[in-house]
Amino acid sequence: AHIFDILFVDNSPRSYYASDLSGHMQRDIGVNR
């Protein structure tokens, strides 16, 4: 998680990254199940 924070925080706001990440994670979980 820390590695991704370093990579993405510079390019986009932390709140946006967190929201986007949670959305992708939920989609991945839904697709896998």
Image (tube, helix red, strand yellow):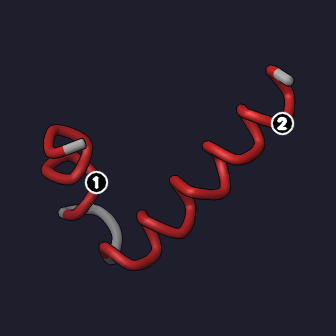
Residue 17 sits above or below residue 8 on the image? below
Pick the quarter of the image with the C terminus. Answer: top right
Which residue extends farthest front?
Answer: 33
Q: Quadrant location of residue 30?
A: top right
Q: Amino acid at mark 2?
A: Gly
State the image coordinates of residue 10 (x, y, percent, origin top left). Answer: 18, 63
State the image coordinates of residue 25 (x, y, percent, origin top left). Answer: 61, 43
Front residue of this view, candidates 24 and 33:
33
Q: Could you tell which of marks 1 and 2 lies nearer the N-terminus?
A: 1
Residue 12 sits above or below residue 31 on the image? below
Q: Taking 7 as reference, is 28 left or right?
A: right
Where does label 1 land, which residue? 8
| Label 2 environment density (alpha carbons within 10 Å; few <14, some 14–19, many ≥20) | few
Q: Taking 31 as reference, is 3 left or right?
A: left
| Label 1 environment density (alpha carbons within 10 Å; few <14, some 14–19, many ≥20) | some
Q: Quadrant location of residue 32?
A: top right
Q: Taking 14 as reference, is 10 left or right?
A: left
Q: Amino acid at mark 1?
A: Phe
Tell whether label 2 touches label 1 (CB within 8 Å): no
Alpha-carbon distance for marks 1 and 2?
Answer: 24 Å
Q: Secondary structure at mark 1?
A: helix
Pick the quarter of the image with the N terminus. Answer: top left
Which residue extends farthest top?
Answer: 32
State the image coordinates of residue 15 (x, y, percent, origin top left). Answer: 39, 79
Residue 16 sits above or below residue 26 on the image? below
Residue drawn at point x = 20 percent, y = 46 percent: 7
Q: Secondary structure at mark 2?
A: helix
Front of the two marks 1 and 2: 2
Residue drawn at point x = 51 percent, y = 53 percent: 21
Where does label 2 land, which residue? 30
